[in-house]
C-alpha cells in the first residue's frame, strides 16, 4: 500500500460511517452530559443520542450546583458526624429542582424507547423525579431501572417529606433501588414481569417486603443488601433462582424455593431456631460472617441449614438419629464458607457437607477475620 | 472405543476474508462466531465460508480473539483464574489504534460475536469519555459540517452539558 492511499484511509471518518444502531450502542455507555454533547460532533451525529437505548444520569455530574452539597456530605462523613439529612439553603433546593427538571427535559427530547436507565443521586422529595419515573415506565417502556437516592435534605428546621414513587408498571423486568425508604409496597402492584429485584440500603416498612413478594410473582432473583426494617422474611416462590442476603438481621427466615440454585447468606443474623430453608436444588451456597463473634451464630445457622441442629448436644456433636434427617443441599456443587477448622464444632459442619453433598466440586474456606481473644471469650 | 472418537479429526472450517485470504479454524473457534454457529446448527455449514465484510487484517485479529477465548474456557483451569486471564488478554487485545477498534467493532457486529462487540464498544466509549468535542473530532476524523451559527444553536439547546 503506498503512502497516499494510507493517508486517504487515515482521513476516513470511520466512526460516523458505522450504522447508527452501532454508534448508539457505543455512546450509550457515556454519562448523560457527554452523551448529549455528541450532538455537536457533526450533522450526522445531531440526533444519534436520541436513539440510544441505555441512559445514565448522575445528578452530581449534571450541574455544578448538585455537586457541591454532595461533597459536603462526604466531608461530613469523614468527620464522623454523618447524618441522614443535610441542611440545605433555599438556593440549593432550587438548583436540585433544576437538575431534576433537566432529567425530564432530556427524557422528552430523547425519541426512542429506553431499555435500561440508571439515575444516580436522584432525590424523591420532589415532584420532578416522580414524573421522570412515570414517564420512563409508562411511555419509554423501560425494562431495567437502577435508581440511587441521595441524602435527605433538610430545609430550615423541616425535613422534606419524600413523595412516594409512582407504581412501576408492566414493562419493568429489573429494578435496583439504593438508599430509599419504601413504606408503601403498593407501588409494586402490577409488576408482573419483574424478574430481578435488588434493594441496597433501603429502609422498609415492617410488612413491605412480604407485600412486595406477593405483588411480584415472577421474581427469579432477589438481592437484599444492608436493608433495615425487614423482620420476617418469608419467601415461597417456585420461580426463584438466586437469593442473596447481606448484612441484615432478621427475626425469622422461611424460604421455600424448589428451584433455587444460588443462595448467599452474608453476615446474616437470625435466631437459628427461626430459620427454615427448603431449597433442594441449591447448586451454590455462600455463607460467611465478618466478625468472629457472629461466627458462632453462623455455625448454628449452618447446622440448622444442614438439618442437624435438633439432634445436636451442647458440644455440637450430633446424636445419631439420622433417619429423619433430609439434607436440603443434595445438589450442591460450589460451597464457600468461613470456618475455623481448628475448632472441632466448626470442622464438624464441614464434615456434614462432605457426607451429604456428593456432587461438590468447588470448596472455598476462609478463616474468619480474627478478633482479640478476650472478645471471643 | 473412546480412543477412536478422540482420534477422529477435529472438524475444520475455512473462512475466506474480503480480500481473498483463507483462514483455517477449528469448530470450537468457529462456533464463537454466532453467524457460523447458526449455520452449523441449521446444518447449512459448508466447510468453506466466505465473509464479505471483513478484511484479512481484521479477521486474523478476530480469530486470535476467539481462539484465546475458546481455549481458556475449555481448559481445565478454575473459573476465577480463567476470568483473570481473559481480562488481561482483553485489555492487551484492545491496545490497538482507533481505526482498528472501529473495524473490529463492526466486524464483531457482522459476525455476531457478543463479547467482542461489547468489549470494543466499551473501549471506544472510554476513548470518547472525558474528552472535549474538538478532541473527539480529531481522534476519529469527524468533519464538523455545522456552520458556526448552527453549532452555536446546537450548543445553546443543551447549554448545561457544555458548562
Image (cartoon, coloured by chain):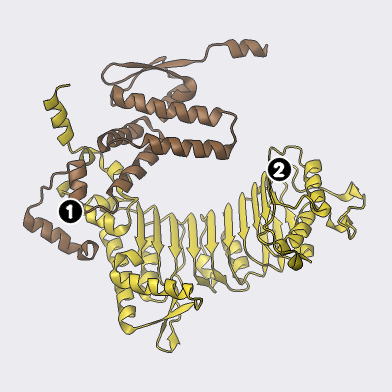
Chain colours: A yellow, B brown
Residue at numbered disc 1: A40
Residue at the image point whose x is 44% and y is 55% from the top: A144
| Residue B155 seen anywhere in this rendered image of the structure | yes
Count neighbours of disc 2 (C-alpha within 10 A) and say few if under 14, some if 14 to 19, many if 20 or more: many
* The N terminus of chain A sits in image quarter: top left
- Return the residue nearer the eye: A74 or A323: A74
- Is A14 located above or below residue B19 in the figure? below
Label 1, label 2: how far apart the Cα atoms are: 55 Å
Residue at the image point whose x is 37% and y is 28% from the top: B62
Q: Position of residue A7 (x, y in %)?
A: 14, 31
- Is A286 located above or below residue B157 in the figure? above
Residue A224, quarter of the rendered image: bottom right
Of callouts 1 and 2, the N-terminal one: 1
- Return the residue nearer the eye: B87 or A113: B87
Residue at numbered disc 2: A332
Residue at the image point whose x is 61% and y is 49% from the top: A241
Pinpoint the chain carrying mark 2: A
Q: Position of residue A272 (x, y in %)?
A: 77, 62
* The C terminus of chain A sits in image quarter: bottom right
Residue A99, quarter of the rendered image: bottom left
**Residue furthest bottom in the image:** A157
Question: Number of marks in the image?
Answer: 2
Position of A283 compared to A221: left or right? right
- Is A249 located above or below residue A145 in the figure? below
Secondary element type, mark 1: helix
Kindly indicate whether the residues beneath marks 1 and 2 are on one polypeptide chain: yes
Q: Position of residue A66 (x, y in %)?
A: 33, 71
Amino acid at each position: 500500500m503506498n503512502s497516499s492511499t494510507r493517508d486517504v484511509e487515515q482521513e476516513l471518518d470511520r466512526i460516523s460511517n458505522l450504522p447508527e444502531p452501532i454508534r448508539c450502542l457505543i455512546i450509550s455507555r457515556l454519562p448523560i452530559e457527554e452523551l448529549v454533547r455528541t450532538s455537536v460532533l457533526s450533522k450526522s451525529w445531531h440526533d444519534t443520542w436520541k436513539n440510544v437505548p441505555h441512559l445514565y444520569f448522575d445528578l452530581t455530574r449534571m450541574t455544578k450546583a448538585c455537586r457541591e452539597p454532595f461533597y459536603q456530605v462526604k466531608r461530613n462523613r469523614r468527620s464522623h458526624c454523618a447524618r441522614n439529612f443535610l441542611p440545605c439553603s433555599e438556593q440549593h433546593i432550587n438548583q436540585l429542582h433544576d437538575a431534576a427538571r433537566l432529567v425530564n427535559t432530556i427524557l422528552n427530547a430523547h425519541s426512542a424507547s429506553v431499555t435500561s436507565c440508571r439515575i444516580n443521586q436522584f432525590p424523591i422529595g420532589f415532584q420532578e423525579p416522580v414524573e421522570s419515573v412515570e414517564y420512563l415506565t409508562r411511555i419509554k417502556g423501560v425494562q431495567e431501572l437502577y435508581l440511587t437516592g441521595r441524602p435527605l435534605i433538610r430545609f430550615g428546621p423541616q425535613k422534606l417529606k419524600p413523595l412516594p414513587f409512582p407504581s412501576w408498571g408492566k414493562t419493568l423486568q429489573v429494578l435496583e433501588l439504593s438508599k430509599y425508604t419504601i413504606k408503601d409496597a403498593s407501588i409494586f402492584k402490577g409488576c408482573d414481569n419483574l424478574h430481578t429485584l435488588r434493594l441496597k440500603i433501603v429502609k422498609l416498612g415492617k410488612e413491605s417486603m412480604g407485600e412486595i413478594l406477593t405483588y411480584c410473582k415472577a421474581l427469579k432473583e432477589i438481592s437484599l443488601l444492608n436493608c433495615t426494617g425487614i423482620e420476617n422474611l418469608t419467601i415461597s416462590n417456585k420461580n426463584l433462582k438466586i437469593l442473596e442476603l447481606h448484612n441484615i438481621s432478621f427475626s425469622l427466615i422461611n424460604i421455600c424455593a424448589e428451584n433455587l440454585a444460588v443462595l448467599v447468606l452474608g453476615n446474616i443474623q437470625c435466631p437459628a431456631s427461626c430459620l427454615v430453608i427448603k431449597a433442594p436444588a441449591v447448586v451454590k451456597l455462600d455463607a460467611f460472617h465478618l466478625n468472629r463473634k457472629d461466627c458462632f451464630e453462623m455455625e448454628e445457622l449452618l447446622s440448622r441449614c444442614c438439618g442437624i441442629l435438633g439432634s445436636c448436644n451442647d458440644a455440637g456433636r450430633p446424636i445419631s438419629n439420622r433417619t429423619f434427617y433430609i439434607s436440603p443441599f443434595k445438589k450442591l456443587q460450589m460451597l464457600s464458607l468461613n470456618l475455623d477448622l481448628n475448632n472441632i464444632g466448626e470442622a464438624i459442619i464441614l464434615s456434614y457437607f462432605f457426607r451429604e453433598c456428593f456432587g461438590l466440586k468447588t470448596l472455598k474456606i476462609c478463616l474468619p477475620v480474627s478478633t482479640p481473644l478476650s472478645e471471643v471469650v | 472405543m473412546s480412543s477412536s472418537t478422540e482420534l477422529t479429526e477435529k472438524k475444520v472450517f475455512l473462512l475466506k476474508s474480503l480480500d481473498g485470504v483463507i483462514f483455517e479454524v477449528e469448530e470450537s473457534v468457529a462456533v464463537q462466531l454466532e453467524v457460523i454457529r447458526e449455520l452449523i446448527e441449521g446444518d447449512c455449514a459448508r466447510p468453506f465460508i466466505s465473509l464479505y465484510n471483513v478484511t484479512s487484517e481484521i479477521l486474523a485479529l478476530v480469530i486470535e480473539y476467539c481462539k484465546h477465548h475458546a481455549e481458556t474456557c475449555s481448559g481445565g483451569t478454575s473459573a476465577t483464574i480463567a476470568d483473570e486471564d481473559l481480562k488481561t488478554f482483553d485489555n492487551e487485545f484492545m491496545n490497538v489504534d482507533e481505526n482498528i477498534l472501529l473495524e473490529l467493532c463492526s466486524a464483531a457486529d457482522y459476525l455476531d460475536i457478543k463479547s467482542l462487540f461489547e468489549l470494543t464498544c466499551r473501549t471506544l466509549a472510554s476513548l470518547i469519555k472525558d474528552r472535549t468535542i474538538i478532541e473527539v473530532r480529531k481522534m476519529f476524523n469527524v468533519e464538523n459540517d455545522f456552520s458556526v451559527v448552527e453549532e452555536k444553536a446546537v450548543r445553546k439547546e443543551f447549554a448545561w452539558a457544555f458548562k
